[in-house]
């Protein structure tokens, strides 16, 4: 298990992944293959109809999974997303977005 605090993960990714800093992603919980991330609401994240745009939701989902991987894999910072598929079940309100990721399985090459 990798010892990385939510604050350390946020700081590291803001330095190495410019979009994380641009969107102000912030890890709130991290450890044991789980990660919870908050995206502070900004008006420019909305689209017509006052809903948070899909690209923001996809980006925060990917970021949360990255945190979950980094919490258990020693070289997790070198991991990349192989596949990301989302089904939007309802319109998100125009407010902070919280993403929760939990690894189901972590093999040598792939994490789910």
Image (cartoon, helix red, strand yellow):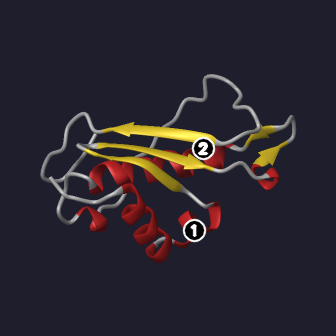
Vertical comparison of 48 with 13: above or below: above
Q: For this view, does 40 lie left or right of residue 46?
A: left
Q: Which x, y percent locates residue 7?
A: 42, 61
Question: Taking the image as drawn, is residue 89 in sight?
Answer: yes
Q: Could you say whether the residue bearing mark 1 is in a helix, strand or loop? A: helix
Earlier residue among tags 1 and 2: 1
Distance from disc 1 to disc 2, alpha carbons, whole Å, reads: 15 Å
How packed mark 2 is, by other alpha carbons closer than 10 Å (few <14, some 14-19, many 20 or more), is some
Of discs 1 and 2, which sits in the foreground? Answer: 1
Question: Taking the image as drawn, is residue 82 in sight?
Answer: no
Q: Residue at x 53, y 49 (%)?
A: 60
Q: Residue at x 55, y 52 (%)?
A: 59
Q: Residue at x 63, y 49 (%)?
A: 56
Q: Residue at x 34, y 60 (%)?
A: 80
Q: Could you say whether the residue bearing mark 2 is in a helix, strand or loop? A: helix
Q: Which x, y percent locates residue 26?
A: 52, 55
Instruction: Depth check: give the residue in front, 89 or 41.
Output: 41
Give yes or no for contact between labels 1 and 2 (Cβ–Cβ under 8 Å).
no
Q: For this view, does 28 lie left or right of residue 94?
A: left
Q: Which x, y percent locates residue 62?
A: 46, 50
The residue pinned by badge 1 equals: 21
Residue 73, numbered circle: none
- Count the numbered circles shown: 2
Q: For this view, does 110 lie left or right of residue 102?
A: left
Q: Which x, y percent locates residue 9?
A: 38, 62
How packed mark 1 is, by other alpha carbons closer than 10 Å (few <14, some 14-19, many 20 or more), is some
Vertical comparison of 9 with 63: above or below: below
Instruction: Depth check: give the residue in front, 83 or 93.
Output: 93
| Quadrant that contains the C terminus | top left
Q: Residue furthest right?
A: 48
Q: Residue furthest bottom?
A: 15
The residue pinned by badge 2 equals: 57
């Amino acid at each position: 298990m990798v010892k990385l605090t939510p604050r350390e993960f946020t700081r590291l990714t803001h330095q190495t992944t410019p979009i994380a800093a641009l969107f102000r992603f912030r890890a709130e919980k991290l450890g044991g293959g789980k990660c919870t991330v908050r995206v502070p609401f900004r008006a420019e994240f909305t689209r017509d109809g006052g809903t948070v745009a899909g690209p923001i939701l996809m980006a925060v989902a990917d970021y949360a999974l990255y945190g979950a991987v980094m919490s258990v894999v020693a070289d997790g910072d070198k991991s990349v997303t192989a596949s990301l598929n989302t089904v939007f079940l309802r319109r998100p309100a125009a407010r902070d977005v919280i993403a929760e990721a939990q690894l189901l399985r972590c093999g040598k090459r792939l994490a789910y």
